[in-house]
Image (cartoon, rainbow, N blue to C red):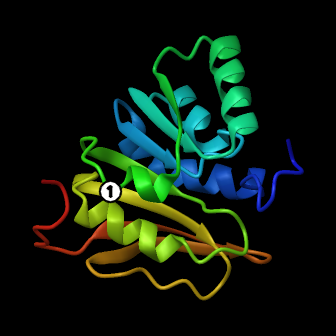
Amino acid sequence: MRNAPGLRPTPDRVRETLFNWLAPFIDGAACLDLFAGTGALGFEALSRGAARAVMLESNRALCDQLHRHAEMLGADNAEIVCADAMAWLEQPHGSFEIVFIDPPFGTDLAAEACARVVNGGHLARRGLVYVESAPGFTPPDPLTIRRESQAGRVQYMLLEAGAGEEGAGR
């Protein structure tokens, strides 16, 4: 399914760095993988001890593939949702300790998705948001950069709500 528009799976080296950053937080976490694509981030989170992962993908063929992979892996704690991530964030769905935001390459959805995650109550108190984007992304308030790096044309960062911020983790 690599020919889906904007599909750009997270490179192995980037994913390894990310999950090293998340190691102290992943065990038992509820994760939300927006723009799931191949599901690499959600399935990796589950393999590293996350309690559950909700994976959103709007492409029907990719959703079908995610369902097959979850079944093949016996990932009963993976919830595959075939829906537009931005529309899904408009409704209450509970909060998550870790949110992955890796929108299709070439779109400008990362900042808006971050804002909707925080303002919609989808981020648990002390929750973390991972964003993968083209270089130049700046996190919207109240999110601040905890860790960041770049690999080629991919900028990636781990964000957290600013100190004392009440908007996150209702």
Residue 162, image quadrant: bottom left
Q: In percent of the image, x 67 and y 41: which residue is there?
A: 40
Pinpoint residue 26: horizontal percent, then vertical percent.
41, 39
| Residue designated by label 1 | 90
Residue 169, image quadrant: bottom left
Q: Is residue 62 left or right of residue 23?
A: right
Pinpoint residue 144: horizontal percent, then vertical percent.
34, 77
Residue 89 seen in the figure: yes
Q: In percent of the image, x 52 and y 65: which residue is there?
A: 131
Relative vertical location of residue 139 with respect to residue 170 in this rendering, above or below: below
The quarter of the picture where the C terminus appears is bottom left
Q: In percent of the image, x 36 and y 81: which residue is there?
A: 140
Relative vertical location of residue 61 with respect to residue 75 in this rendering, above or below: below
Pinpoint residue 107: horizontal percent, then vertical percent.
65, 74
Q: Is residue 160 left or right of residue 39?
A: left
Q: Secondary structure at mark 1?
A: loop
* Numbered marks: total: 1
Q: What's under tag 1, amino acid-wise?
A: Glu
Q: Report the front residue among 94 and 149.
A: 94
Q: Report the front residue among 44 and 106.
A: 106
